[in-house]
Image (spheres, helix red, strand yellow):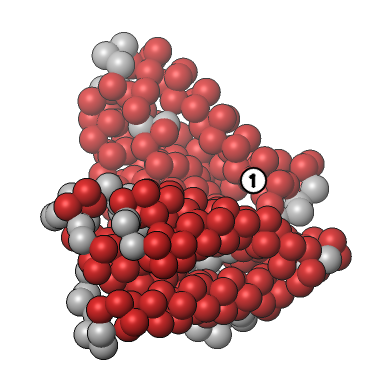
Amino acid sequence: MKSFDDLSEREILALAISLEEEDERVYADFVDGLKQDFPRSAAVFEGMQEEESGHRRRLIELYRRKFGEHIPLVRRSEVKGFVERKPVWLMRPLGPEVAHKAASAIEEETRRFYEKAAGRTQDASIRQLLDDLAQEERSHESRAQELRAEELPAEVRQAEERASRRLFVLQIVQPGLAGLMDGSVSTLAPVFAAALATRNSWDAFLVGSAASLGAGISMGFAEALSDDGSLTGRGHPLIRGLVCGAMTALGGIGHTLPFLLKDFHVALVFAAIVVVAELSVITWIRHRYMDTPTFSAAMQVALGGILVFVTGVLIGSS
């Protein structure tokens, strides 16, 4: 990597062109990621993309006058001092707030670049353009707010927030809740059956760990292979599978960990307390995100948990 202070005026201009091209491409990715579910927010980034395109054209025109037709490719990754950016495709599913926060960081970094670059140039016309662009980048945040206000009246923002919440529930909460319920409830039988049959904490811990991890792997694969999300809108299958598998394993491991205690009876009591806490969390999530009445959610979760728990107790005591 090359130090910014070692760049020539030609290289500074080439880097500025490269930065504007990258920013323009990022905003185009935002438009593509938002247009289906958040069309009005996508329109905001279309306006910002056009502004970056205008900056790029002005920089290229000045470069041609000063240095000719060939523009060397000087990228931000080759110059010290730039913050590494997370690629847009890794931000999917993309929401309006995530995109706006990323855009603010981009504008701030680009403004700082122009201010420092202007202070390093001796050519009057180059310095003037860089100063102008620094001022424009400074005003971009307020311009972004203006564009957002123009394109996103209050009722549209509320509608997009509701759509964002629905996507979050569909793509994250539902697979996570399914995994947590399966892990917390289905592993009760083998864990407590093993505990009561052996009266040994370590044996119960081994059975619980195997059941939890096995269930996590199974549920993760089942969720990931259920559909690709293209028609259902449920998001990327890999993300859903990871969320579901992780929550399944977590749900089972929760009431398995107490059996690391050597005293069997103490471990059994703590495991029962953890089960009650797990079922309470599941009830809260169902009420908070699935709009299920609290009493109804509690009865449904408790009934399933009690049935599986009794099954484990009966088998372990036989």
Q: Quadrant of residue 280?
A: top right
Whole-percent x and y of residue 222?
39, 68
Which quadrant would residue 90 be assigned to in this image? Answer: bottom left
Does 291 appear above or below 50?
above
Q: Secondary structure at mark 1?
A: helix
State the image coordinates of residue 74 (x, y, percent, origin top left).
Answer: 22, 69
Q: Residue 147 location in percent, x, y?
A: 71, 67
Q: Which residue is mark 1?
A: 285
Task: Give above or below for 44 relative to 209.
Answer: below
Q: Which residue shows up at 20% across the image and 57% down it? A: 7
Q: Is residue 37 left or right of residue 248?
A: right
- Position of 267 compared to 45: left or right? left
Q: Amino acid at mark 1?
A: Ile
Question: Would you say residue 135 is visible in this rendering?
Answer: yes
Query: Could you tell me residue 235's position as x and y percent?
Result: 50, 71
Work out which quarter of the rendered image holds the C terminus and state it: top left
Of 270 and 72, which appears nearest the observer?
A: 72
Task: Please tell me whether residue 208 is drawn above or below residue 48 in the rendered image.
Answer: above
83 or 186, nearer to the observer: 83
Identify the residue at the far right of this view: 155
Q: Nearer the viewer, residue 82 or 164?
A: 82
